[in-house]
Amino acid sequence: MDLIVVRLLFVALLAGSAIFSSSVRHDRMGERERGRRAACAVIVFEFRVRAPQPEALIGARAGSVLGIMGAALFAWCCAVPR
């Protein structure tokens, strides 16, 4: 129940901040709707991230390690004077 209240407050806060940060003052309803949609997208993303599969975690770890090694190798090769 508390998490639902926090999510609703998040949606209201993002919608309100979208209204007040808008550069166009005559389109408040459109800005509020964009803020609500952005908040809902963040909440949906939270649901997707909450329960990852073990295979996805292993793949993410392997990908990050390979990416770091590739970046280090690239930086080392480019830093060698010719």
Image (cartoon, rainbow, N blue to C red):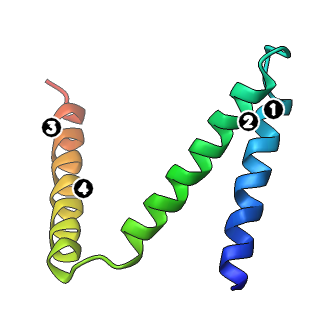
Of labels 1 and 2, earlier in sequence is 1
Q: Earlier in the sequence, mark 4 or mark 2?
A: 2
Name the quadrant containing residue 74: top left
Cα–Cα span, label 1 and label 2: 6 Å
Q: Nearer the viewer, residue 15 or 59?
A: 15
Amino acid at the residue labelled 1: Ile
Give the class, few, some or many, for how many residues have Cα within 10 Å of label 3's Cα (few <14, many ≥20).
Answer: few
- Residue 32 marker: 2
What is the spatial separation of the Cα atoms under label 4 and label 3, in whole angstroms? Answer: 14 Å
Q: Are marks 4 and 3 in contact (CB under 8 Å)?
A: no
Residue neighbourhood size for the residue with mark 1, other residues' Cα within 10 Å, grouped as few (<14), some (14–19), many (≥20): many
**Residue 69, percent from left and from top:** 18, 56
Say what amino acid the circle numbered 4 marks: Ile
- Return the x and y of residue 41 as percentages of the image width and height: 50, 50
Kind of residue indicated by mark 3: Cys
Q: Secondary structure at mark 2?
A: helix
Element assignment for label 3? helix
Tell me the residue at 22%/70% (across/down): 61
* Amino acid type at mark 2: Arg
The residues bearing labels 4 and 2 have C-alpha atoms spaced at a distance of 40 Å
Q: Is residue 42 left or right of residue 20?
A: left
Relative image position of residue 51 (x, y in whole percent): 35, 79
Residue at mark 4 = 68
Front label number (4 vs 3):
4
Say if 70 sits above or below 3 in the image: above
**Element type at marker 1?**
helix
Q: Earlier in the sequence, mark 4 or mark 3?
A: 4
Q: Which residue is mark 1?
A: 19
On residue 77, which mark appears? 3
- Whole-percent x and y of residue 13? 79, 52
How many numbered marks does the figure carry?
4
